[in-house]
Image (cartoon, rainbow, N blue to C red):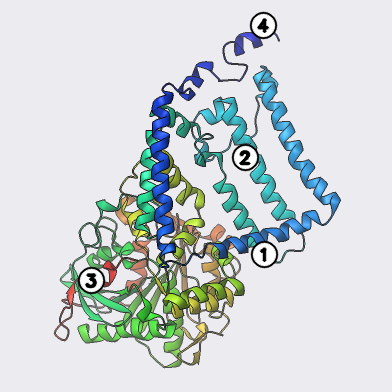
Amino acid sequence: MTDSKRDKNEGNGGFPGFDPKSVEPYIVRDPEAMAVNFARALENLGKAASAWLAPRERGEKVDTVADPFTDMVKTLSKVGEYWLSDPRRTLEAQTHLLSGYFGLWTKTMQRLSGDSSAEAEAEPVRDKRFADEDWQKNPFFDFLKQTYLLTSNWAEKLVGEAEGLDEHTRHKAAFYTKQITAAFSPTNFIATNPQVYRETIASNAENLVRGMKMLAEDINLGHGELRLRQTDMTKFAVGRDMALTPGKVIAQSDVCQVIQYAPATEKVLKRPLLICPPWINKFYILDLNPQKSFIKWCVEQGHTVFVISWVNPDQRHAAKDWTSYAREGIDFALETIEKATGEQEVNAVGYCVGGTLLAATLALHAKEKNKRIRTVTFLTTQVDFTFAGDLKVFVDEEQIAALEEQMNVLGYLEGSKMATAFNMLRASELIWPYFVNSYLKGQEPLPFDLLFWNADSTRMAAANHSFYLRNCYLNNALSQGRMVLDGKALSLKDVRIPVYNLATREDHIAPAKSVFIGNQYFGGPVEFVVTGSGHIAGVVNPPDKHKYQFWTGGPTGGDYENWLAEAKETPGSWWPHWHAWILAKDHRMTAARPPGGKALNALEEAPGSFVMERA
């Protein structure tokens, strides 16, 4: 070694940037206190296990965890069959992984010995999980990180290069592989996460005592299932901190309440505005707080706003299907609007699956010469499910049949099931960071209104959810003219009213490409708009925040990438652009309308009782 190299690496063990003193936070100072707290943590872990077992022993909960696990094993075994069926392929796969390990080990040893030529690395990993500086500076943790990334990339490559897989199986295999690699990240374990390790040593494992206590509490709260702690649920209450826009519940059916909001202007648009939100989660995402409320903003622009608040179904609603939700939800709301305002012409907004139901209902209306809805706005709504993203992983005949069998026992799908599925779409962001922070670090999460809403899950009526999965994700029936509501085959080409079709660029639930493809199926003019950010933040983006941007004006034919390349980008919120589009269709005004008008008495104050029902 040259003098310069010796000087450079003196005192750092030969690892660039490594200070031997940095290992001191990893040395146990008080073994006795550590042992006592480990025992306390194990005691709390035992309480967590008891909370999980108790409802199963009492027969209150049937464990269905084996169903997705079985599907995962079956799917990944097909990948394994390809690589193991030919000894040469097996050897090739093994050699590729082992040579990677050997290269990594050699490079690590060279860096420890002070060989500066081994220091140069490719593009650094931009992964929030490895933000702690010891993932780079400490040779042990750096080696763990590199080994993990190497193995993860190898596993994903095996899926990508396996031949003979149908598209759905390959999609599932890639998704399950990502779930496994996300779960086995070294950041998720005490001894292999430098930050958790240091905190455990510094607190003599007090963090684990707190974390295991929180784990037991969250399993108890979930009645035998882990209700992952993502925010402080005690800091918010619907009707106190969110869903605050003044209004009245003016009508109620078996599947919904209809809310009319109090006017904020002397004059209002002649056409009322009906919002049809998804029944997966609750409507108040559009009325989260006064600063973020799309509903409040619409009222302030002169809209007479009506919102459907869907019931949180139980066994009484088992047979409620899409026809029920169309008739007892959307049509019921339209009849309520006419009674309250005297108006038959309405502007309608549908969000996510609420938009898909609204599109199907419009096609049904076209068959029946019902012209109440004069314009329609779809927010992150899919009507064609060819490119519906990772949610398609959970949908095939075998999985749906198993799910239907479970739903038929209760009459509904438990809210936690859908919440878990959505969290799995972004496991590295929505599951494992909260697992580490809460149960390993023992930290209470910060209060966050959006995560409170996300955790306020809803059940799904059995018939409704089965119809949705089969007709949309499995058979793509709506766009193909094969969906049947109330005995009538539907065609979206019959929907000839103006359409404002909004997608969000980073959407993982309704991908922008999937929303774009839906443009071609409508029979009328379509204004397609893409916003920055994702499924929630891209939609709930008040103008005064000056966040993100939106794109307009690209060719609605061709493919999504060409549309985006030719579209005009505008900074800020899409809300004013949409409002201008509404005004261009009909800007007539009339006197402000109080909730219910002269015909309907208020049943209760907004946001109503249906939204208060917890799953």
* Vertical placement of residue 604 versus 127, above or below: below
Q: CA distance from mark 1 to mark 3?
A: 44 Å
Do the residues under discs 3 and 2 have CB atoms within 8 angstroms?
no
Residue 169's tag is: 1
Whole-percent x, y for residue 250 in the image: 21, 79
Residues packed near mark 3 inside 10 Å, few (<14), some (14 to 19) or many (20 plus):
many
Residue 67 versus residue 604 in the image, above or below: above
Q: Which residue is mark 4?
A: 3
Q: Position of residue 101 (x, y in %)?
A: 71, 35
How many angstroms separate mark 1 from mark 2 (CA)?
25 Å
Labelled disc at residue 608: 3
Image position of 244 with respect to 355: above or below: above
**Between discs 4 and 3, the one toward the N terminus:** 4
Name the one closer to the observer, 77 or 267. Answer: 77
Q: Are marks 4 and 3 in contact (CB under 8 Å)?
A: no
Answer yes or no: is residue 282 visible.
Answer: yes
Q: Amino acid at mark 1?
A: Thr
Q: Residue at x 34, y 57 (%)?
A: 221
Q: Nearer the viewer, mark 4 or mark 1?
A: 1
Query: In front: 526, or 421?
Result: 421
Q: Secondary structure at mark 2?
A: helix
Q: Nearer the viewer, mark 4 or mark 2?
A: 2
Q: Residues within 10 Å of mark 2 (few under 14, many from 20)?
A: some
Please report whichever mark, 1 or 2, sits nearer to the chain's N-terminal start: 2
Q: Residue at x 56, y 57 (%)?
A: 565
The reply, left or right, for residue 25 in relation to residue 386 is left
* Image quadrant assignment for residue 111: top right
What amino acid is labelled 2 in the image?
Tyr
